[in-house]
Structure formats: C-alpha cells, structure tokens
Image (spheres, helix red, strand yellow):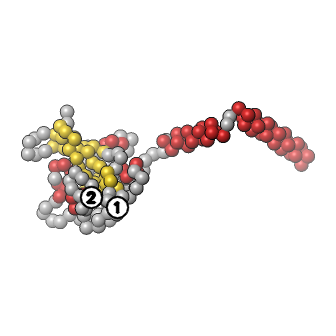
Amino acid sequence: MSRIIETLLSRLDRSVESNVRSSARVFGRRSFIAATGTALLGAAAGLPVLPFDRRANAAEPAEGDDPCAYWRHCAIDGVLCEQSGGSLTACPPGSSASAVAWVGTCSNPEDGKDYLVSYNDCCGKPMVPTATFCNNNKGERPGYRMGLYNDVNWCMANADKGYHCTVSIVMGLAE
C-alpha cells in the first residue's frame, strides 16, 4: 500500500514540477506579480465595507440649543468641526479632508429651497472629546449606496486614517 502511495506522490511531484517549469518559461515574474495583485485587489473589492461607529467618544449636546438641528446637518454623522478647531466648511489645521464623502439633500428653512450638502470627514488628528457628535440620518441609504451612506469612516481613503471631525459644505441647489 505504501509503495502505491509513493508512486502516486512521485507522479504528482513530477507533474507539478513540469507544469511549474513550463509556466516559468512562458510567464515572467512581473506578469505573475501583476496577475497576483489583480486577483488580490479583485477579491478585496468584493468585500463589504463595514460600518464605523464614532459615537463612543462623542459628547452629548447641551439642553435647549442643539447644534445638530442646524439645517446643513440634516444628514451628518460625526463630530462638528466648528467645535474642533475648524469651521462649518473647513477642516482644522493639522487635519485634511477625506478623499471621498457622502451627500445629503437638506432644506434651508430661510429660503425654502433644497440644497445638496457634501459631508467630508477631516482626518489626521484625534477627536476632541468635548465636541458635539451629531447623528442625523435623513435620506440615508443602505451600505450598497455608498455616496448616500453616512455610517462609514470615510478617512479610510486617506493616507492618515484617523477620524477627527466632519464639515458640511453646500454644493449648490438640489435639482
């Protein structure tokens, strides 16, 4: 019995060696590395993007005056940059805007018009624990509609992935 197994393993070994040597003659190392990289990236693209919950270190808003109720924050999910050293539309010094963002359509009660608002995470600094955390989900869609899904750490697209705060930039009238 062991002799049969040895014979089969020997044949398998020769067959694998022959195929590997044949492939080495046809394909170079660079094409192998390129094909492997393509396969790995293709496999990674199929993985779902998991939600990222930023509520753990968020401060509760004060009674009465709720900064999260501001009309531009209708679809925000994060810490307000205007309380973290930045402004409503600009990241604080030492941080950078995320390369990708999500959008919301918010109604301005002053003029009654709907505006397209881009929410960009600011990356590269730690969160300010005393800043207000807002989680408004108006118009949010499931995770497969990434541009309308706000429960993701959008800093993943940047070199420095640390989340700091979120800005609300009016892009124009919604049509």
- Badge 2: how crowded within 10 Å, few (<14), some, or many (20+)? many
Of the pair 98 and 40, the residue shown nearer to us: 98
Q: Residue 92 has which mark?
A: 2
Q: Is residue 54 above or below residue 19?
A: below
Q: Is residue 146 left or right of residue 40?
A: left
Q: Residue 88's x, y, as percent?
A: 20, 53
Kind of element beneath mark 1: loop
Q: Quadrant of the C terminus?
A: top left
Q: Is residue 62 left or right of residue 133?
A: left
User: Which residue is located at x 29 percent, y 49 percent?
Assistant: 120
Q: CA distance from mark 2 to mark 1?
A: 9 Å
Q: Is residue 79 visible?
A: no
Q: Residue 156's x, y, as percent?
A: 41, 51
Marks 2 and 1 in Cβ contact (< 8 Å): yes
Residue behind mark 1 = 125
Q: Is residue 26 above or below residue 62?
A: above
User: Which residue is located at x 32 percent, y 53 percent?
Assistant: 96
Number of labels in the image equals 2
Q: Is residue 85 visible?
A: yes
* Residue type indicated by callout 1: Lys
